[in-house]
Image (spheres, rainbow, N blue to C red):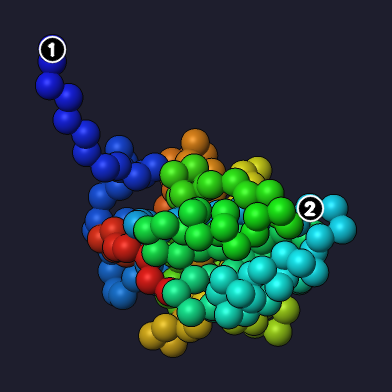
Amino acid sequence: MADLSWSETTPLSRIYEAGRHGVKEGPAGVALAELTSFDLVQVMARRGRWQAAVEACRGLNGKDAPARPQALPAGEARLIWSGADQFLVLSRRGAGFEKAASAFAGVASLSEQSDARSLLEISGPRARDLLAKVCSVDLHPAAFPVGAAAATSIDHTAVNLWREDDADGGPVFHLLVFATFAESLWHTLLDSGAEYGVSIDARRAWQP
């Protein structure tokens, strides 16, 4: 019998290469990175059980589930609005689904999404300019402050997008995309940011 060996990969493993893309002169206007080692659970409240799901979320994460387009820090997790009466729970790789299954038993339906999505970080002083080319959401700070979230599309690809705390004087956005579309979206982001200079950072584990 042949010996089989397995190695962990990510949706972008085939094409991901840290380095510089686009304009090479001067500091990069955009930084892109693939974030790994996370658990992701979609929580969908059952009919008439939204308030019960909110209370279950509070018991599990110490914070109410987001009822409007927000991404909320909740201890070791991030709660991300994804539609009416539903949200995502993003946490470090571990037993995220098992904990959620216990907490939401009888009040919500769950979908384990950890290996079905790619998580990207877009940051830098020109990050908003890059996204403005490919996303119809108004990302001006007055309309999309830190903590805002949207279920939208980029280049005809469904994504969950939210804004994190600023870093190094520029905005930080996180983006979830289905794994099968990750490579296509990655190329779109690289092409859209080329004129600003793109720094592709080494992969790193997601941190709350």
Residue 28 lies, in percent from the top left, at: 34, 70
Residue 38 falls left or right of residue 49: left
Residue at horizontal 57%, vertical 71%? 60
Would you place residue 35 above or below residue 70 in this image?
above
Neighbour tally class for label 2: few under 14, some 14-19, many 20 plus, Cα within 10 Å? some
Residue drawn 71% across the image and 73% down it: 55
Q: Position of residue 36 (x, y in %)?
A: 35, 56
Specify the quadrant of the image occupied by residue 208. Answer: bottom left
- The residue tagged 1 is 1
Type of amino acid at the residue the image marks with label 1: Met
Give the residue at x 49% y 71%: 77
- Residue depicted at 29% across the width and 42% down the height: 9
Q: Which residue lies furthest to the bottom in this view?
A: 169
Q: Is residue 65 above or below residue 10?
A: below
Q: Nearer the viewer, residue 174 or 187?
A: 174
Task: Give the secondary structure at mark 2.
Answer: loop
Query: Which quadrant of the structure image shows residue 91?
Result: bottom left
Please count the marks in the image. 2
Residue under pointer 2:
46
Expressed as whole percent of the image width and height from the top left, the position of residue 1 reads 13, 12
Please tell me how crowded label 1 is: few (under 14), some (14-19), or many (20+) other residues with Cα within 10 Å: few
